[in-house]
Image (cartoon, rainbow, N blue to C red):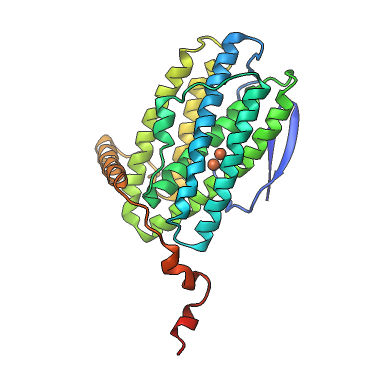
Amino acid sequence: MCYLLATPSQKVTVALVPIDPVLASHGEESAYDFGGATFDLDDPKDREIIRFVLSQALYGEATGVYCGKSLYSAGSLEAAKFYVRQAKQELGHLQLFAEVFRALDMTPVPAHWAIRLLSAHNNYYPLKVLMEHAVGEGMVLDIFKDLLLQTLPDDHPEVARIKKKLLVVCREEQEHVAWGEKETVRLISERPWLKTPFYGLVELQMAVLPSLVRAFRKRGAGHPVLTHLEGFLGYVRERVYTQGRKLGFVPEQRPGFLFRLWAMCFGTLLFVRSQFARSKSQLEKVYLRELGFDEARESP
Ligand SMILES: [Fe+2]
Ligand SMILES: [Fe+2]
């Protein structure tokens, strides 16, 4: 399957691993349109904004490398293969963003508290696949694919090379989102009670997003790109709800306040419980079955 990721001056076709078209939330759907608004990389104020955005990306990629921790508790060979591959890819992204900083002659700043909260590692597998992969990396992809690829100015000598790097990152992040979506669907079918706390957690995550927009707003009122932030936030929020509906845990009609409150409390309790979850090794318990040796074990 191929998706076309397009920028005003550049069209690059990226071949992706096959992704279930029902589950894939990114790719063929139209992205948010910034209407041609771009940053000016020669303007110190704009450079501060880009530095802030790239610093959040760099932090997210650094924490992404910790996905290697999930290898220890991988419950199948497929999961083990995915986490080995993902850790390698995230390490590559980390180095790639460092190259972007150097190309733009910038130094990173510490990550915003909301990014640190949203990218924290979770040992509880159901929350890991939902919050980190499906929703978290889905929003990361929104920032990379929609915001950075559209608003970095093509007339800057380094931007073509930077966009090429970003397209590589986007292609790999799309794989991570697809894994999270596939595993979320499997877990919901096995444990339908997860739907309510999953929905509540997404509502809570959506409630954190405006604080990030406020952080941007402080950095440049009236800027041609930043005037789109409210619209972009609305687009991301709606895309996440659509994703949740496709995955089967967001109700078709937005529930009333009391149900939302109950779902958020349930989600919070599950999140608190997840903070006490310990990684438990799995492969030594399932490797014979996973390798197809179950029958051999039963033979005399
Ligand atoms: Fe990444
Ligand atoms: Fe990722």
- Name the spot of residue 216 as percent of width and height, x first: 48, 18
Residue at 72% over, 23% down: 158
In this image, 8 relative to 26: left or right? right
Q: Residue 66: x and y, percent?
A: 48, 43
Count of numbered marks = 0
The answer, for residue 24, to whether it is visible in the render is: no
Q: In this view, does 166 lie above or below 53?
A: below
Report the residue at 44% width, 44% height from top.
244
Is residue 165 or residue 108 the one in the foreground? 108
Instruction: Please indicate whether residue 279 sits to the left or right of residue 32 in the image.
Output: left
**Which of 68/247 is in front?**
68
5 on left or right of 59:
right
Q: In this view, does 161 lie to the left or right of 250?
A: right
Asked whether residue 14 is in view, the answer is yes
Position of 197 relative to 204 (above/below): below
Q: Quadrant of the C terminus?
A: bottom left
Against 160, residue 195 (above or below) is below
Q: Residue 254 location in percent, x, y?
A: 36, 38
The residue sitting at 66% across, 11% down in the picture is 42
Q: In this rendered view, identify the residue nearer to me: 72 or 2.
A: 72
Kindly give the residue lying farthest to the bottom in the view shown: 300
Q: Please name the residue shown 41% across and 38% down the image.
A: 120
Q: Where is residue 48 in the image (x, y as percent from the top left)?
A: 55, 14
User: Residue 200, located in which quarter of the rendered image?
Assistant: top left
Q: In which quarter of the image is ligand 1?
A: top right
